[in-house]
Image (spheres, helix red, strand yellow):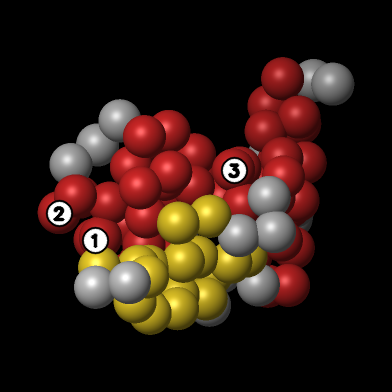
Amino acid sequence: MSKPYDELDPVLNVPARLAIVSALIKLKQADFGYLLEITQTTQGNLSHQLKKLNEAGYIEIKKTFKGNYPQTVCKLTPKGKNAFEKYVLAIKKYLHL
């Protein structure tokens, strides 16, 4: 028996993670500072959320240096893009769109 509503992806059903993936859908990549700004969270929390997204295979994280400063750049994976699209479809079902 099928359910009228799809289960929402638990990885994306966290506001900060959803904000990160939503931003990366529009951008090719984003650095830690930009993601910190849009999520309005702490550095520690953002690091934790990025780790969860990376462990799920939804984002790739590259750590490099820009001058003498560490730089973390995140990019959405095809798996992450697919998960986001499914999440949006599931939300639309909830909203009856």
Q: How packed is label 2: few (under 14 Cα within 10 Å), some, or many (20 or more)?
A: few
Query: Compared to 95, does 14 lie above or below?
Result: below
Residue drawn 24% across the image and 61% down it: 48
Q: Nearer the viewer, residue 59 or 86?
A: 59
Q: Say which mark, if any, is on residue 44.
A: 2
Residue 94, percent across and down? 68, 27
Q: Three-letter amino acid code at disc 3?
A: Ala
Q: How packed is label 1: few (under 14 Cα within 10 Å), some, or many (20 or more)?
A: few
Q: Three-letter amino acid code at disc 1?
A: His
Q: Residue furthest front?
A: 67
Q: Nearer the viewer, residue 72 or 65?
A: 65
The CA distance from mark 1 to mark 2 is 6 Å
**In the displayed structure image, the side of residue 97 where residue 95 appears, left or right:** left
Cβ atoms at labels 1 and 2 below 8 Å apart = yes
Residue 73, percent across and down? 46, 66
**In the displayed structure image, the side of residue 37 where residue 6 appears, left or right:** right
Q: Say which mark, if any, is on residue 23.
A: 3
Q: Nearer the viewer, residue 4 or 43?
A: 43
**In the displayed structure image, the side of residue 45 where residue 56 appears, left or right:** right
The local secondary structure at tag 1 comes to: helix
